[in-house]
Amino acid sequence: MSNSTRLYTKGLILGYKRGLRNQHTNTSLIRIEGVNNKNETEFYLGKRVAYIYRAQKKTKATLRKTRNASKFRVMWGKVTRSHGNSGVVRAKFRHNLPPKSMGATVHVMLYPSRV
């Protein structure tokens, strides 16, 4: 029997930060599972966020004839602050998330810790 520890919690991409007329694509809004108010978001500030998606082609590892080639790719980001009072957080990704990612799930990692 293995003792596995959980390294992430699920999140949902809601969209970009926006006003009435303009949207700011450099900041994404994420709802974290089990977080329902502004006080509960405090734990997640500074945590890493991974958007995992599947591409058509395998990675370039196939060109080097290695076995660990995969069609899965990851876009990394970081939770920056809370957004509103209902437990939604803002996250900035190294590369802006594509519009196709809206409604998709993300992994909100439980590291790094802010002790």
Image (spheres, helix red, strand yellow):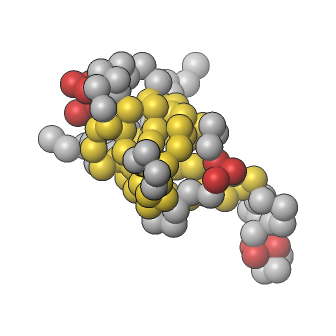
Can you give x and y, in whole percent of width and height, for residue 20 in the image? 43, 45
Name the foreground residue: 48 vs 68: 48
With 115 as the anchor, is 95 left or right in this view?
A: right
Report the residue at 49% width, 58% height from top. Answer: 25
Name the foreground residue: 94 vs 16: 16
The number of discs equals 0
Name the foreground residue: 84 vs 5: 84
Q: Is 37 rendered above or below residue 57?
A: above
Can you give x and y, in whole percent of width and height, for residue 110 in the image? 37, 38
Q: Quadrant of residue 7?
A: top left
Can you give x and y, in whole percent of width and height, for residue 84 in the image? 30, 32
Q: Is 44 rendered above or below residue 66?
A: above
Judged from this view, the residue extending furthest toward the bottom is: 64
Report the residue at 63% width, 37% height from top. Answer: 103
Report the residue at 45% width, 55% height from top. Answer: 22
Judged from this view, the residue extending furthest toward the left is: 115
Name the foreground residue: 9 vs 40: 40
> Can residue 15 be seen by looking at this rendering?
yes
> Can residue 5 be seen by looking at this rendering?
no
With 94 as the anchor, is 37 left or right in this view?
A: left
Can you give x and y, in whole percent of width and height, for residue 113 in the image? 25, 43
Quadrant location, the C terminus? top left
Report the residue at 47% width, 24% height from top. Answer: 33
Q: Quadrant of residue 32?
A: top left
Quadrant location, the N terminus? top right
